[in-house]
Amino acid sequence: MWLTGGIDYSKRGDRCYSDRPPGTAFLAVPPYLLGAQLGLTFPSRQWGQAALFGALLAPLLAGVVTVWLVYRLGLAMGAGNRASLGAAAVYATGSPAYIYSGTLFIHSVAGFSVTAAVLLTVFVKRHMCESGRARAPQGARPPLVLALLAGFAGGWSVLSDYSAIVLVPIYLAFVAWAGWRKRHLWSALLCWCAGAAAPAAVLGFYNWVCFGGPLVNSYRYNVAFPWTHSLSTTYVTPFGEGLMGLLYFLPEKSALGWLPTGQVFWSPVMHLAAAGYLAALARRDTRRGALLALAVLCAVIALSAKHRTWYGGGTRDARYIFSVTPIWFSGLAIWFGLAPGRKRGAALRVGFWVLTCVLIAETLALRSMWAAFGVAARLNLLSLQMPHAGAVAGGKAVGLWWEAEKWLFARWPRLLWLLAVGILVALAAMLEYRRDASAAASNEKTGPRKQGNRSRSDVRRR
């Protein structure tokens, strides 16, 4: 609340609460207490929030792990190791991941939980197909634990972002479709619901204690924006205007002016990711996973397009769809896998990579500009842009001491983010390389035997 100028809060009786879903705050409690014990305080005299740096570890770690989930989702979609690593690297540097991993907004944790739910649901489908075959592989087990984890991730996504409630029917329908006429279908569905029941119970108890009922959320008592008290006054924007604004820019000049607010405008490489998903629909082995990802994307984007402040309020960056931005970027792994081989001709190969590199460079340039001058970047605690945030949030001016503090601390968090992401991607690449090397070694051992059998059969035929 203090970060946004004291406007994003709810009040019931004489008690004040945050008007945001409580999932991010729950995850921030353990590192907050740890930071308090270790004496980690926020390095700014202006705000002086004790152990706030410890609380920031929750969205930071969620953002870093989401980069790894983008990599894993690319592999689950049938892309190769290098293609998935490339998609994860582009997501880490060409999306709002850095900005929203450094502030106590809900978007980093929401993106992590939604991406984890989609990935685990795809794993449930894969293992269900394997265990449901007539000749199942030896040791194949029903994916009950995976279904339990997928349900927990899906439930926590609702606990972190109320709009993720529209994704629960999509997850259940996908599991039912993937396991139709196969064994363990009902067990997987029950485990998914059981996993989602724990976060749902936490949210219901929180709403009951704070707002008087398990189905009464924080927006019912919002103070600054009474229109959030009802869904009929919240989702009122014309669909075409909201959709164009979420993806590109305002279709016509309005009170907000001509603003490039859309995620795709600032990250044009997302066009290639969309093309990758469309290509995955044409392949039988990746069609179901691509349909799940596209259904999740379309559901959140369609709902956010109807929101009254679809542009993200004061940030003007369409941040409401950030929960599905990692899933969108995972389509880049499929796109990279479509690279033409040597048999397709040099001209086609050069054209493919020129288009890809140009859009990636444009994305990095636009995102760097947005990170330097955007309102959300000024509210980013890891960037320590607190003089700007003070101006936005109504704070007082700071003295000359701030210049030295800004020079010392304003650069290391971005390097810390890139270092953490780089280490994670490098570890993933090393593990996959060792796995590929072991698979190649096993193929070499079995290769001569198969070749020998083939040569003997040829001799017999002759």
Image: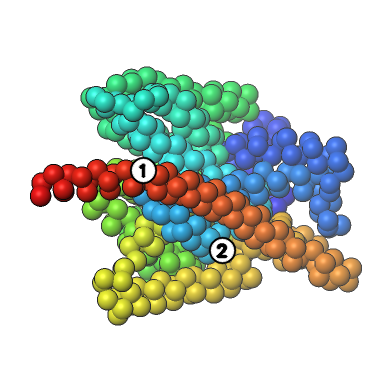
Neighbours of disc 2 within 10 Å: few (<14), some (14-19), many (20+): some
Give SS at disc 2.
Answer: helix
Name the spot of residue 278 as percent of width and height, x first. 28, 56
Seen as rendered, the residue at the extreme bottom is 347
Please report whichever mark, 2 or 1, sits nearer to the chain's N-terminal start: 2
Name the spot of residue 203 as percent of width and height, x first. 56, 28
In front of the other: label 2 or label 1? 1
Q: Amino acid at mark 1?
A: Thr
Task: Identify the residue shown where x is 37% and y is 68%.
Answer: 251
Write down the quadrant of residue 10 in the picture. top right
Q: Nearer the viewer, residue 356 or 105?
A: 356
Image side of residue 86 versus residue 334, left or right = right
Neighbours of disc 1 within 10 Å: few (<14), some (14-19), many (20+): few
- The residue to which callout 2 is attached is 93
Relative to 176, does residue 84 appear above or below in the rendering?
Answer: below
Residue 446 - label: 1
Q: Amino acid at mark 2?
A: Thr
Name the spot of residue 225 as percent of width and height, x first. 56, 47
Task: Identify the residue shown where x is 22% and y is 48%.
Answer: 455
Image side of residue 267 versus residue 284, left or right = right
Name the spot of residue 172 as percent of width and height, x first. 35, 31
Residue 393 in view:
no
Seen as rendered, the residue at the extreme left is 462
Residues under labels 2 and 1: Cα distance?
42 Å
Task: Identify the residue shown where x is 44% and y is 41%.
Answer: 119
Q: Nearer the viewer, residue 434 or 44?
A: 434
Image side of residue 208 versus residue 234, left or right = right
Task: Identify the residue shown where x is 36% and y is 49%.
Answer: 78
